Image: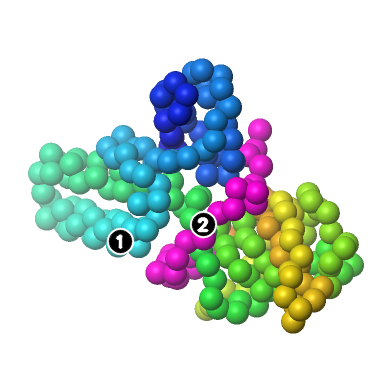
Amino acid sequence: MLQMKCPQCEGTIKSPFLVEIGNITCQHCKETVTVNDVFVATKSFTMHRDALLTQIKHYRNLLKNVEQEKSQLIKNDSSSSEAQSLDQYHSSLRELLEASRENYRLRVSQNLPLRVAWKEVKSPGRVLNISTKGAAILTKGLLGALRQDDTLQVLLGLPGADSPLKMTARIAWQQKREQAAEARALILGVQFQDMDRQTHGKVWDYIMTQSDAPEIPENPKHRFAAAS
């Protein structure tokens, strides 16, 4: 669970949407406050979200090591207390990674194959950054045609994939590219809609293989609206 301390009453605000919204109403004092200093809390750990994201690859490798150790304990028929302790540690690590899974945005340095379709218009594009919830993409040929909340079809090719991922996305924000060399180019912030489990897993696996790249500091103006 994501949580933060209310700067007004110092009560704990808990919400799965804390990294997506700029402000939130405290359920204790009813004041609307700016989202800041978000923590990830599990049964065993409480960790600042930024610290977790900078060490995400380390924790993923640690989880793999624990899973291997669990398998070895089963083979060796080790004591139930030792297995139970390892199970608890394994569950806590999984919970930490699940919390980061929805909130990690990767800067993409590769030129991934991308095509954006809106109504009858199809346009190639480039992924600037991506998370399991959405992406920022650069595209041409759609300037002036799109509006916030319009729905797009996105075809994204990932390294090693047999076929491109097909995703439906909602436009959360858009920004005209200012560089003269990219006249009529448009940056779109899109939120993936109804992503199936398999596609979600493939996007996350790609992010993890590239996770030495820096995470994107998110512009509060470009945060997705929280679901009701």
Question: In terms of secondary structure, what is the magenta stretch mainly?
Answer: loop
Say which quadrant the C terminus sits in: top right
Q: Is residue 5 left or right of residue 132?
A: left
Residue 145 on the magenta segment: no
Read off the residue under disc 2: 217
Specify the amino acid type for callout 2: Pro
Read off the residue under disc 1: 58
Question: Above or below — where is 84 with respect to 149?
Answer: above
Where does the image place residue 124, in percent across and percent down from the top left? 75, 76
Ranked by sequence position, the earlier of labels 2 and 1 is 1
Question: Above or below — where is 123 with respect to 44?
Answer: below
Q: Is residue 212 left or right of residue 117?
A: left
Q: Which residues are magenta?
A: 203-228
- Label 2: which secondary element: loop
Tell me the residue at 61%/77% (across/down): 112
Dot 2: within a 10 Å radius of its alpha carbon, few (fewer than 14), some, or many (20 or more) residues? few
Specify the amino acid type for callout 1: His
